[in-house]
Image (cartoon, grey):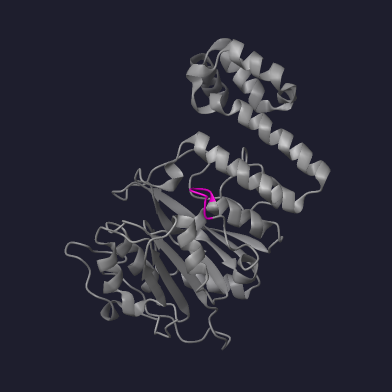
Amino acid sequence: MRSINTALTLKDLPPPPEGKTGWPWTEEIEPLPSQMVDGSEFPKISIVTPSYNYGRFIEETIRSVLLQGYPNLEYIIIDGGSTDNTIEIIQKYEEYLSYSVSELDEGQTDAINKGYQHCTGNLFVWLNADDAYINSTCLKQVSELYKQGHQLIVGECLNVDSSNNPIQISQKFNGYSIPQKFEDYLKFWSFVPLPQPAVFIDKQLTDRAFPLDKTLRGTMDYQLFLRVLSQSPRSIWVKQTWVKFKYHGDNKTMSSDAVTYAELYRVAILEAQKNYNIWRQFLFQISCNDFLAISPYISDTTTLTLNTILRTVILRPTLISWLLFWKMFIKALISHEAYQIIKKMAKHS
């Protein structure tokens, strides 16, 4: 690992591309001093950026990290052998990086695992190559919260499209989440996903969570957070937007529900086996299978008929204990359109 100056300013970095203004192109703050107010060192923050063919986004990501002006930063970029201009951009900023490599890998999770092997900090986070810190004070705030004893520090994300226009993804996830208990997060059918790029974790906890399963395509953060939450960390939720989270159609998070649920199920069962006794594992498996039986009707209402829902509950009678089942039943009974009308009327009454 290279020992480098990380309290950078605009004059230290290459000039921004033509036409780019504002943060993190032409705006900055004064770099932080070498020591905190109490005279101690700033905690070292290790940031890993996995990358593959995101040349249209990664320069903003890199600059948003480097222009934090943070004096104890460890920034690592693991590229999967990009064929666009990504490598050219990484090389442009290489002297400011603690470590970087571009080589074939087995996917995003493999890249994150590789990057983690080079992390030596007090805190860990990964920031994808299409995301960026939205302001220049994020790492300063995180360091102060860590010094107060917090081990899981959760900020908020602003979800944007490829043109940086704010968008709402769903009622379930819109860039923020209160830290939850392990038991609640394990229930993938009702948990609220933590905003991954805005979650900083004490490395003592992540040391017991890595490596992640490199076969996971889009739920590696779910596995990481389950493993961290199982250690009952001291957590805090900061109601401030720290990260711009881009949705542009190529994200792993844009996978189909069926693929995502299958991965969530696999991760949840594995982590339940590590933390639950045999009886609790058995009950949890029933709940998982109940949800998977009814999940196809959530996103595809065209298959939801009274016959299909009755056939499903006959095969899995435990579904009668689920509020979700009764919602599906009512939809099948009166039609999806009528259900939505009634729901809107109830909401405004």
Q: Which one is in front, 219 or 198?
A: 219
Main secondary structure found in the magenta portion: loop
**Residue lying farthest left?**
18
Percent coordinates x, y for residue 312 in the rendering: 65, 19
277 inside magenta stretch: no
Q: Which one is in front, 136 or 80?
A: 80
Residue visible at 56% across and 89% down in the picture = 39
Percent coordinates x, y for residue 214 in the rendering: 52, 55
Evaluate whether residue 194 shows in this view.
no
Residue 341 higher or lower than 282, as above or below: above
Evaluate whether residue 334 shows in this view.
yes
Asked where in the image residue 59 lies, by quadrant, the reply is bottom left
Residue visible at 55% across and 24% down in the picture = 297
Residue 84 higher or lower than 10, as above or below: above
Residue 132 higher or lower than 120, as above or below: above
Percent coordinates x, y for residue 107 in the rendering: 44, 55
Q: Is residue 15 left or right of residue 312?
A: left
Please give the range of residues in magenta. 214-219
